[in-house]
Image (tube, rainbow, N blue to C red):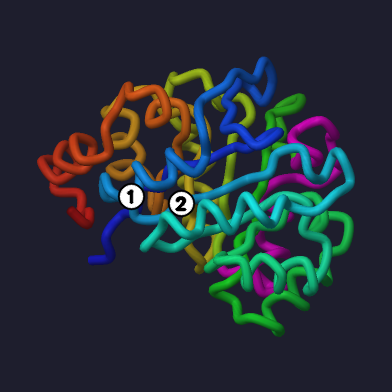
Amino acid sequence: MLSKRIIPCLDVKDGRTVKGVNFVDLRDAGDPVELAWRYAQQGADELVFLDITATHERRGTTIEMVKSVARQLNIPFTIGGGITSVADAEALLNSGADKISVNSAAVRNPALIEELAKAFGVQFVVLAVDTKLVQGRNMVHLNGGRLITELETEDWILKAEALGAGEILLTSMDHDGTKNGFDCILLDKVAKSINIPVIASGGAGKVEHFTDLFLNTDVDAALAASVFHYGEISLPYLKQELKKHNIAVRL
């Protein structure tokens, strides 16, 4: 059985790690370089770095910050924010990324997924999807959740898999930062409909939320931010608790 992955996420704005609720009301959560080092030492399976205002501000991800974080790591490192071309992705790969995450640019130009997969391999391409329930339907949102699209979340994920996405990072905007638990119903539905790994994001507040996620869905990984940044849950303790429930994790 493949081990379930625990992935801290650094949402970075103006050189600082930030965290909000439902994608708004951001507050400072620390220095991304220090946090990256801490999580690598504590046993994180991977680390995700998202430059959360790059797309909205129409610029690329901050390369120097990425290099500084990458130097702290001995675990897979995924970078997202403002990636619109193969050249953007190559620059991040050369700066220390193991995988890149695309979101808004892929919706606007789905061929980008195919281009990235051909250039670097399917395993390099993570499709990030920010979803929100609108009149009973899960709809894809762009630009850090600021812009609603006409795409239904499940339809878009199926299309992205066909184009060459190697992994899905699915964030429930309704659950984000609420600490009330993951959207297990949607996550399981998506995980069962595709053949690539799903990373669950949005809603982690206590250890039981991770346990519920892995026992009740087919997702491959759980991503969280504030519970780790503010010391509410430690990575070693979380993994020990998951193991008690016979959930395979790397200790």
Cα distance in 3D space between marks 2 and 1? 7 Å
Q: Amino acid at mark 1?
A: Ala
Give x and y (percent) for residue 83. 77, 58
Q: Which residue, as the protein is rendered here, is positioned at the far top? A: 25
Q: Is residue 141 magenta?
A: yes
User: Which residue, given by chain and number where applicable, does mark 2 sit on?
Assistant: 47
* Relative to 12, 113 lies left or right: right
Estimate how packed mark 1 is, as few (under 14), some (14 to 19) or many (20 or more) residues with alpha carbons within 10 Å: many
Q: Residue at x 14, y 46 (%)?
A: 243
Q: Which residue, as the protein is rendered here, is positioned at the far left? A: 244
Helix, strand or loop status at disc 1: loop
In the picture, the disc for residue 44 is 1
Give the quadrant of residue 124: bottom right
Estimate how packed mark 2 is, as few (under 14), some (14 to 19) or many (20 or more) residues with alpha carbons within 10 Å: many
Helix, strand or loop status at disc 2: strand
Give the quadrant of residue 34: top left
Q: Residue at x 78, y 52 (%)?
A: 82
Q: Which residues are magenta?
A: 140-166
Give x and y (percent) for residue 187. 50, 44
Q: Residue at x 78, y 44 (%)?
A: 54
- Foreground: 234 or 34? 34
Give the quadrant of residue 79: bottom right
- Foreground: 109 or 162? 109
Q: Is residue 229 magenta?
A: no
Task: Tell me: residue 84, above or below residue 16.
Answer: below
Give x and y (percent) for residue 157. 66, 57
Give x and y (percent) for residue 32. 52, 39
* Relative to 115, 234 lies left or right: left
Task: Tell me: residue 90, above or below residue 130.
Answer: below
Q: Residue at x 49, y 33 (%)?
A: 183
Q: Amino acid at mark 2?
A: Leu
Q: Confirm or deny contact between disc 2 and disc 1 (CB under 8 A).
A: yes
